[in-house]
Amino acid sequence: MELVLADIEVVYGKRTRNHAVRGVSLRVRRGETLAVVGESGSGKTTIAKVAAGLQKATSGTVAWQATGDGGVGGGPGGSPARRQRVHMVFQHPVQSLDPSWRIRRSVKEPLRYLGMADDEAERLVRRLIAEVGLDAQILDRYPREVSGGQAQRVAVARALVADPEIVILDEPTASLDQTVRGRILTLLADLQVRTGVGYLMITHDISSVRRLATRIAVMYRGLIVESGPAAAVLEDPRHPYTQALISAVPVADPRVRWDGVVALPRHPDGTLAVTSCPVPGSCHEHGPGLHEVGPDHVAGCTKAVDPQKAATT
Ligand SMILES: Nc1ncnc2c1ncn2[C@@H]1O[C@H](COP(=O)(O)OP(=O)(O)OP(=O)(O)O)[C@@H](O)[C@H]1O
């Protein structure tokens, strides 16, 4: 199955209208990881919430399409009674768990919601807790009694317990230290191989992108300005904004985040002053639209600058 967002617009506020997302289209397939990257305020979390059904789009559609991989909708994959289509993992794992519930209850909740009998739910919960590398004893604890890394493993177990098609990861490792971050990324990658789950990952963290992404969508001021296979976008970025983002992060230092730390130069009106931009200031509103720059690789720049050419002009 494929989650398809088409032409999503989100405008916050009635009086002071904030056009947070402008005509965004994307798709996430089972077994794939789409990383949505871009600086703070570019609309990534809003897109994640729309995809998860937690935020209504002002216009556009969110739909599931069959891809013939036997997912939800009567195919051979999994019992529909155990299936949830989409689940979200948030940035702050401890805060995302109800403090008054033992871990067992939090992980079991999606199954209870689906009406599963308690003994079957208990069996599944124990299996998932083992799969995320935790001891079953943790089920009797409260969130305040576990570490941030353990809480994120619990959140991943809870996200996967109802066998979703897609898990939305909103900055899944941002609040964790470097070592724990690496382990959670390994866990997410393993679970994807084992279950075929698809990930829509919102992140600032370039090491997460390099590690997990099969596709990358780059957002700038509510627009997708480039998207394509991860290797193509990382190695041959074509939009000046993507080029600026990638060149601003030294590859050798995975601790450097893709945002906040990176101060990109701006014009007084807030648009980016990217030196390789061929038509500065032309991308204010809906931009020039996306066009193909490589196999399955699109960029929304009038010239979709060739980095080598840009360097010599
Ligand atoms: N509930 C809300 N009400 C009003 N404006 C909002 C709301 N949520 C987000 N916004 C605005 O929408 C724009 C996009 O925000 P969003 O959180 O989606 O961006 P982001 O790329 O996820 O940023 P960050 O990385 O900081 O979370 C921003 O201008 C933000 O201020």
Image: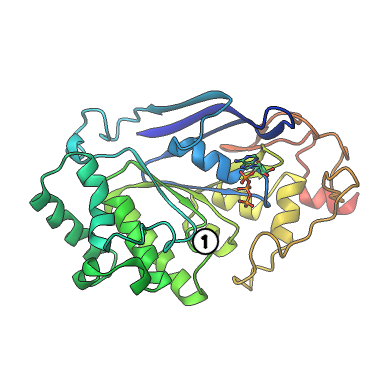
Q: Residue furthest left?
A: 119
Q: Position of residue 185 (x, y in %)?
A: 43, 64
Q: Position of residue 104 (x, y in %)?
A: 23, 60
| Image height of 213 relative to 67, above or below | below
Q: Position of residue 226 (x, y in %)?
A: 65, 41
Residue at (68%, 49%) from the top-left corner? 237
**Label 1 environment density (alpha carbons within 10 Å; few <14, some 14–19, many ≥20):** many
Residue at (64%, 55%) from the top-left corner? 235
> Of residues 221 and 154, which is closer to you in this image?
154
Q: Which residue is mark 1?
A: 208
Q: Position of residue 34 (x, y in %)?
A: 50, 46
The amino acid beneath tag 1 is Ser
| Image height of 1 relative to 130, above or below | above
> Of residues 159 and 305, which is closer to you in this image?
159
> Of residues 156 and 290, which is closer to you in this image?
156
| Image height of 1 relative to 261, above or below | above
Q: Residue furthest bottom?
A: 179
Q: Secondary structure at mark 1?
A: helix
Could one spot residue 162 in this view of the protein? no
Horizontal side, residue 113 vs residue 218: left or right = left
Horizontal side, residue 151 vs residue 113: left or right = right
Residue at (23%, 52%) from the top-left corner? 108
